[in-house]
Image (cartoon, rainbow, N blue to C red):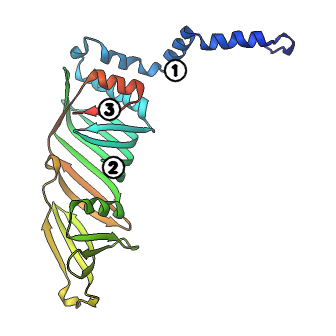
């Protein structure tokens, strides 16, 4: 067994040890050993990448991204939208002739708007190797939870006629910007329509009779990527939702993707 002899130690030996630790060849070997999980991803930079089968390419990408970013913050640009979140789960499995992917994100900020948790399941995923490489999904299901306060702040950026605020019980206080009307409401989304139920209201400080209150249902405006909100339900101070996005496609540059995985920079889908 090796032992340390204080008598044999000297400042010169310490300096020599420091030189060895800073030696470029040793540093290169250390990086290679500690980043061994990156080795398969190096194939993404090879000139023969377009010959990779979709299975191999999907394995390289999913394992590389999960190994590099699993449990850590990740920055992604998706079709010109900025996404920052902690990657908790990334699973890929073959489903017939295509793939199915499951991604779980926490602490998501989508273009700066906070969403507590999001689970994205992409069905019928296909990879088409090339320059650039294309990825297509037959359908994408997005489930998640967002705080009522954050959702109302997000809606407030749309120049609404109503100023919206969350009450302590989770309900919504809506104040008309021009008329002297304040209403306390609850809302629910089902099958692409928004139902608003008015619990109480005041006009110029005078209570509105309950017989004049009620609920109304309005269709939701069109969403990006032809998405449809299947449901949105308030639970306490949070809103749980499910949205479906029909067939989507995007592209990515394999060289940029490899660099992002190796160095930890932003992943880009365009």
Judging from the image, what secondary structure is the residue with disc 3 in?
strand
Q: Which residue is mark 3?
A: 267
Q: Bin the neighbour count of mark 2 within 10 Å (Cα to Cα): few under 14, some 14-19, many 20 and up.
A: few
Q: Bin the neighbour count of mark 1 within 10 Å (Cα to Cα): few under 14, some 14-19, many 20 and up.
A: few
Q: Which residue is mark 1?
A: 34
Q: Is residue 1 visible?
A: no
How far apart marks 1 and 2 lie (CA) works out to 34 Å
Quarter-wise, where is residue 47 in the image? top left
- Which residue is rendered at x = 43% and y = 35% of the image? 70
Q: Considering only order in the chain, which callout, 2 or 1, is on the residue closer to the N terminus? A: 1
Judging from the image, what secondary structure is the residue with disc 1 in?
helix
Quarter-wise, where is residue 172 in the image? bottom left
Q: Residue furthest front?
A: 178
Q: Horizontal and vertical percent for residue 68?
A: 42, 30
Q: Is residue 229 visible?
A: yes
Q: Considering only order in the chain, which callout, 3 or 2, is on the residue closer to the N terminus? A: 2
Q: Bin the neighbour count of mark 3 within 10 Å (Cα to Cα): few under 14, some 14-19, many 20 and up.
A: many
Q: Which residue is mark 2?
A: 112
Indicate the quadrant containing the N terminus: top left, top right, bottom left or bottom right: top right
- Which residue is rendered at x = 64% and y = 10% of the image? 20
Left or right for 5, reference 37: right
Depth check: give the residue in front, 124 or 267. Answer: 267
- Which residue is rendered at x = 29% and y = 58% of the image? 154
Tell me the mark number nearer the camera, choosing from 2 and 3: 2
Left or right for 59, reference 34: left
Tell me the mark number nearer the camera, choosing from 1 and 3: 3
């Amino acid at each position: 067994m090796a032992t340390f002899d204080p008598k044999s130690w000297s400042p010169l030996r310490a300096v020599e040890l420091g030189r060895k630790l800073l030696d470029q060849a040793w540093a290169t070997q250390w990086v290679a050993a500690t980043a061994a999980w990156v080795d398969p991803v190096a194939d993404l930079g090879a000139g023969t990448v377009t010959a990779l089968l979709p299975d191999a390419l999907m394995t390289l990408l999913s394992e590389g991204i999960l190994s590099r970013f699993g449990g850590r913050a990740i920055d992604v640009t998706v079709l010109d939208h900025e996404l920052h979140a902690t990657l908790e789960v990334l699973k890929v499995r073959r489903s017939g002739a295509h793939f199915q992917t499951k991604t779980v994100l926490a602490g998501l900020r989508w273009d700066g708007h906070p969403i507590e948790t999001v689970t994205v399941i992409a069905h019928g995923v296909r990879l088409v190797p090339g320059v650039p490489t294309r990825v297509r999904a037959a359908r994408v299901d997005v489930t998640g939870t967002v705080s009522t306060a954050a959702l109302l702040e997000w809606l407030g950026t749309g120049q609404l006629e109503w100023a919206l605020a969350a009450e302590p019980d989770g309900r919504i206080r809506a104040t008309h910007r021009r008329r002297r009307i304040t209403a306390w409401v609850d809302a629910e989304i089902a099958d692409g329509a928004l139902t608003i139920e008015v619990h109480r209201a005041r006009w110029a400080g005078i209570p509105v009779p309950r017989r004049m209150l009620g609920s109304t249902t309005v269709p939701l405006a069109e969403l990006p990527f032809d998405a449809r909100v299947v449901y949105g339900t308030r639970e306490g101070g949070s809103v749980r939702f499910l949205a479906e996005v029909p067939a989507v496609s995007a592209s990515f540059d394999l060289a940029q993707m490899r660099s992002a995985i190796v160095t930890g920079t932003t992943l880009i889908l365009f």
